[in-house]
Amino acid sequence: MSTGTPEQVIIVGGGPVGLVAAMRLGHYGIPVVVVEAEEQVSRALKASTFHPPTLEMLDEYGITPGLIEAGLVAPTWQVRMHETGEFAEFDLSVLKDETPHPYRLQTEQWKLSELLLAHIREKLPAVRVLMGHPCVEVSQDADSVRVTVERPGGERQELTGRYLIAADGARSMVRAALDLSFEGLTFPETTVLATTRFPFHEHIPTLSYINYCWASTGTFSLLRLPGLWRVSLYPWEGESIDDALQPESIQKKLQHVLPREQAYEVMEIRPYRIHQRVVNTYVNGRIVLAGDAAHINSPSGGMGMNGGIHDAFNLTDKLRRIYAGESDALLGQYERQRRPIAIKHVLQQSGRNRARMQERGEAQRRATLEDLKRKADDPRLAREYLLETSMILSLREAAAIE
């Protein structure tokens, strides 16, 4: 059975990227159906940092105030020498003339997904969101796309549309079905995320909400969220990932961050591998990739989810113009504007962030810290650096590409 208007856009993936795309298209009056494998919004440990231009984009639809209410405004971020307490601190207020949101916002990505879903259900009845409908097959011809989904209970259903947006994440079923090359590499280290309610800020008063820390045993990050801290840890030298995931290993590392008599209450633990990959082509006929389906990167610096949302804004603007009568060659411009930017700014910048934090040599760490302090203390240099690391520069470069 085939359902849906042949003019609809089918979006595979109901995470932040897919839901942003659906919201935008819905406000443009374009029919949309979103298919998502999960039955409800996933609350797994994923992204937690929103950059200034992302907040500016979402503000247009009234989403940003809800995010701010659900999160923490972080006006600064730091790189720290853990044992000595030295740090370089970047103050995003130097961007006050560049953006109405000169800060990072710290909150879990699932809160954005829930806000988007509520917005769609309240304001956009023509946008259908089918939760618990995994995509099992895709195909296309010169005039249409077809997606087969599995409905709750196991029955299969075919959806027909004009275009398909693949926003189904790092393990994209659509990308695999198209047999696209996902070029890049996987780094040897595995990150272990752990969350705790322990108030690190009450015991280390110089902390920012976002802290990238060097320690004698390796590195870690401390990211504050409402009511908890998220700690990014790495296996110590000679420690296997299986051993690093054991509760006693997590406790040992947290005690190294801040020794205390009591054990830490650890709420969640999640390991993840670090990849730097980009698909060889974003546009495949009537099927277009966005977000992690198109590119994945080190989470250091919080660029992955933000870059995917920027993809969604760019792509939906092109689709708006196509539905208004312009040529679908505009999809080629989407690829020209977003793929090089993903490589140059998202993958390379997050890779530089990762490499900086993986540095083990004391002399090199010291030299890097002094360089960062020099930039942070000079308003001109700080502005240039933050335009890059806050993803403002990448969007400006993309907009200039024809």
Image (spheres, rainbow, N blue to C red):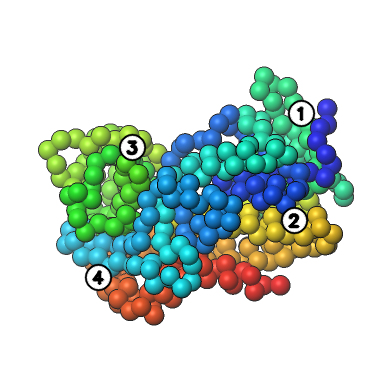
Q: Position of residue 203 (x, y in %)?
A: 17, 49
Give the residue type that dot 2 points to: Leu
Q: Residue furthest top?
A: 153
The residue that appears at 25% across and 70% down in the rendered structure is 366
Quadrant assignment for the N terminus: top right
Of badges 2 and 4, nearer the viewer stands 2
Give the residue type that dot 3 points to: Leu
Q: Position of residue 268 (x, y in %)?
A: 36, 35
Query: Residue 366, which numbered label?
Result: 4
The residue that appears at 33% across and 79% down in the rendered structure is 378
- Residue at mark 2 to residue at mark 1: CA–CA distance: 25 Å
- Residue at mark 2 to residue at mark 3: CA–CA distance: 44 Å
Q: Earlier in the sequence, mark 3 or mark 4?
A: 3
Q: Earlier in the sequence, mark 4 or mark 1?
A: 1
The residue that disc 1 covers is 157
Q: Position of residue 223 (x, y in %)?
A: 34, 51
